[in-house]
Amino acid sequence: MSCHLFQVFTTDISGISLPDKFTFPFYYEPHPLSVIAAKALQNYLETQNDFQHNFGLNKNQEGLVIGKMFGVLVVQNQKNELGFLWAFSGKLAESNQHPLFVPTVFDMLTENSFFKREETILNQYNKKIEKLENDENHLAAVKHLEKIKQQAAVEIKEQKEKIKSNKKLRAEKRKTITAEAIEQLNKESQDEGILLKKMTQYWRYHIQAATELVDVFTQQINQLKEERKQKSSTLQQQLFTEYVFLNQYQELKSLEDIFMGNPPAGAGECAAPKLLHYAFTYQLKPIAMAEFWWGQSPKGEMRKHQQFYPACTGKCEPILKHMLQGIPLEENPFEKNTAKGKELEIVFEDDYILLVNKPAEFLSVPGKQITESVQTRIKASYPNAMIVHRLDMSTSGLLLIGKTPEIYKKLQAQFIKRYVKKRYVALLDGLLSEDRGIIDLPLRGDLHNRPNQIVCFEHGKPAVTHWEVIERKDNKTLVYFYPITGRTHQLRVHAAHPLGLNTPIVGDDLYGTKANRLHLHAESITFIHSISKEIVTFTREFFF
């Protein structure tokens, strides 16, 4: 079967050995062959005139800016020739199809496809609903109903206030008048109450009549919305069933089966599944893969132009698990016990608390794949001990531990009330122009790419960091971080995000560039000792 999108290497690759195993998609260093294939794609993007897409690289270009993830897959054809394929995530220039890129696994935009036909029907429902909602008689009926309600509320309120006021006046008169006059006052009170009752009934009748006029339209609109909802659900289920992915055994599996009927939006549209599906369709053997970002970073996230990134976990991991079945993969670092052979230094210990210095790449508590952690190490010697707070696996520094559940609760309460003060030292990959400042950027988890965090002003939790410069040297900046809140990856995101310091921490493999380690260390902690009630400070410096 011929493959017209198979591209041969034009540079000499004779001295480059093939990888022993295929790229582990969720954490990798790109293979030299992938780098060459990616460079060829980047050169094309810089010079092409085949399409127009605003990546945000041209300052003079107006309109919506959409950076894009691109992918390359190094493959071997049936003649044992090496080449590569290109792909993009989502749509490019409002299209799924471009001559040099592998197609989408299922093209919803194809003319006369079931999706386009059903989409046309749904759009007709939208137009009918919009027409009814904006119908002059409907709007007039709604306006009339609101006017009736307001008028009723005003008149009934006035009558109630009149009754209340007259009641007070009659109470004063009763003190000085005859029994016959009192009887007249009672009658006045009864008449006012009867009038209120009649007014209430009168307005209830008119409100009901006005509501019925509105309901004539409301019922039609709700009926159309329900029909639209059912058709949309049917279309979605058909799409999930038709959207199928190949693996090397030519086994097909649908989105519905992969995600148990509830795939996230955009699942299957990323570059990685497109590349692999095309390769398996044309009997091409996958050798290595890489994905890189091209253009401006999306809002909330940290994406650097031309930088390589792993496949996303939320959308791609379940799909790639099926597609890469039976293909030997490089080592999964998330299953590697990086704590093995590392010692936990005890910085302070008394009868109530422990303070340890956690090494980098050492879990605070057990993970899904790795059980060895500070918690398991400590519990081996202190069965009742409990870690009061956590540090990221890649962050080193001071961890506070309560030796008993009672002490743990008292220390934890200090964290909740923000009595505990912590200081981190970090080396940033660039020079800061200011000497100090405050970062206030709310954070939430990236639902489709755990464990990453994103800045989100709508749904994020408050996150505040104070910072100050210690030293600038060799195009790097050493800083102190003083977190006021304790959100996941707070310091890493606040450092890297354009609205923060826009300067990632050295070695940040999630929001910056990988190095020998994450250059972030929790070096100082201040809290109230649960027994002595003294304010104590402990420090363990680290020099990057």
Image (tube, helix red, strand yellow):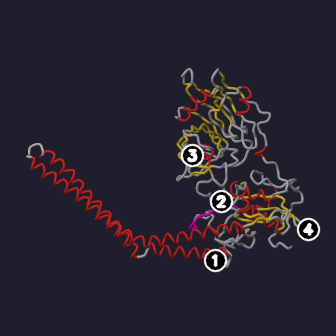
Nearest to N terminus: mark 1 or mark 2: 1
Nearest to N terminus: mark 3 or mark 4: 4
Nearest to N terminus: mark 3 or mark 1: 1
Which residues make up the magenta segment?
Answer: 60-71
Instruction: Evaluate if marks 3 and 1 touch, with contact meaning CB atoms under 8 Å apart.
Output: no
Which residue was labeled with disc 3?
Answer: 433
Name the spot of residue 367 as percent of width and height, x first: 72, 41
In the image, 308 versus 214, the foreground residue is: 214
Q: Which mark is residue 79?
A: 4
Badge 4 marks a residue whose secondary structure is loop
Is residue 362 visible from the viewing direction of this image?
A: yes
Which residue was labeled with disc 1?
Answer: 117
Q: Amino acid at mark 1?
A: Arg
Which circle, 4 or 2, is nearer the viewer? Answer: 2
In the image, is 169 to the left or to the right of 356?
A: left
Which circle, 3 or 4, is nearer the viewer? Answer: 4
Residue occupying the far bottom of the picture: 112
Which residue was labeled with disc 2?
Answer: 264
Instruction: Evaluate if marks 2 and 3 touch, with contact meaning CB atoms under 8 Å apart.
Output: no
Which circle, 1 or 4, is nearer the viewer? Answer: 1
Q: Is residue 65 magenta?
A: yes
Q: Which mark is residue 498?
A: none
Q: Amino acid at mark 3?
A: Ser
Label 2: how many Cα within 10 Å (few below 14, some 14–19, many 20+): few
Quarter of the N terminus within the rendering: bottom right
In the image, is 11 to the left or to the right of 148?
A: right
How far is mark 1 from mark 4, CA to CA?
Answer: 42 Å
Badge 1 marks a residue whose secondary structure is helix
Q: Amino acid at mark 4?
A: Lys
